[in-house]
Image (cartoon, rainbow, N blue to C red):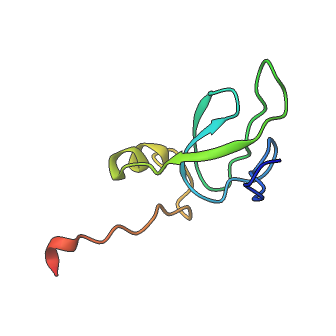
């Protein structure tokens, strides 16, 4: 019996956090808020796990072709403090 009782998002669920996600078969996808978790082309419905948050430069690329009302995360420069 598994010790991890959390429910991971599955295909067709809405993405809540921008990032790089990996499914249970090792396929990685870069997804942003509002996207739908995709189905695996070979296996169908699958669970997804957040493995990395995007870098600021990657986030700018993710949002370059989106609507004006879609904002990326706020980044605070710690050197100003």
Give the residue displayed 84% in from the left and 27% down from the top. Answer: 44
Residue 74 lies, in percent from the top left, at: 40, 69
Answer left or right for 77 relative to 25.
Answer: left
Residue 43 lies, in percent from the top left, at: 82, 22
In the image, 18 versus 23, the foreground residue is: 23
Q: Quadrant of the C terminus?
A: bottom left
Give the residue displayed 68% in from the left and 48% down from the top. Answer: 35
Residue 48 lies, in percent from the top left, at: 69, 42
Residue 16 lies, in percent from the top left, at: 65, 59
In the image, 75 versus 44, the foreground residue is: 44
Q: Farthest bottom residue?
A: 81
In the image, 3 versus 17, the foreground residue is: 3
Answer left or right for 3 relative to 20.
Answer: right
Answer left or right for 49 relative to 80.
Answer: right
Give the residue displayed 37% in from the left and 49% down from the top. Answer: 55
Specify the quadrant of the image occupied by residue 11: top right
Give the residue displayed 62% in from the left and 56% down from the top. Answer: 33
Count up the numbered dots.
0
Specify the quadrant of the image occupied by residue 28: top right
């Amino acid at each position: 019996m598994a010790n991890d009782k959390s429910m991971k998002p599955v295909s067709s669920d809405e993405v809540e956090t921008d990032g790089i996600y990996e499914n249970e078969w090792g396929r990685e996808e870069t997804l942003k808020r509002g996207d739908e978790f995709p189905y695996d082309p070979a296996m169908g419905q699958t669970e997804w796990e957040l493995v990395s948050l995007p870098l600021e430069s990657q986030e700018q690329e993710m949002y370059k072709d989106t609507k004006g009302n879609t904002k990326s995360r706020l980044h605070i420069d710690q050197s100003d403090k």
